[in-house]
Image (cartoon, rainbow, N blue to C red):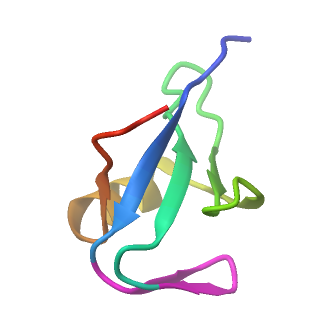
Amino acid sequence: MSIRSINKYTVIKRFSLGKRMYDTLDTLYIQELDSKNHEPQKVFNSHKEYVTDISADIYLSLNKEFIVQSADNY
């Protein structure tokens, strides 16, 4: 099992995920895609608490128009 990094994202368009609404300028942390093992990606809130798992398709949709990767990734 490989270790996947977690990237920081900023919300640019309001959306709902895991029974929570995310507003513009909120911060999310999303585990990078594991294309080899096809495991879901984990999403964490701004307090780095686990929110939910998402599929690669949902991640791509979010990345397309709802979130942008932050310049100050960890």
Residue at 59% from the left image edge and 23% from the top image edge: 4
Magenta part of the chain:
13-22
Residue 57 percent location from the top left of the image: 42, 55
Residue at 45% from the left image edge and 72% from the top image edge: 26
The N terminus lies in which quarter of the figure?
top right
Query: Where is residue 62, by image quadrant?
Result: bottom left
Q: Nearer the viewer, residue 59 or 25?
A: 25
Instruction: State the count of labels.
Output: 0
Residue farthest along the top direction in this orientation: 2
| Secondary structure, magenta segment, majority class | strand
Query: Where is residue 47, by image quadrant?
Result: bottom right
Residue 2 percent location from the top left of the image: 66, 11
Residue at 76% from the left image edge and 57% from the top image edge: 50
Residue 61 percent location from the top left of the image: 33, 64
Residue farthest along the front direction in this orientation: 72
Residue farthest along the left direction in this orientation: 65
- Is 63 placed above or below 1 here? below
Q: Nearer the viewer, residue 7 or 17?
A: 7
- Is 73 placed above or below 67 here? above
Residue 41 percent location from the top left of the image: 60, 45
Give left or right: position of 24 versus 32: left
Query: Where is residue 12, by image quadrant?
Result: bottom left
- Is 13 placed above or below 36 here? below
Residue at 22% from the left image edge and 69% from the top image edge: 65
Residue 72 sits inside the magenta stretch: no
Give left or right: position of 2 versus 5: right
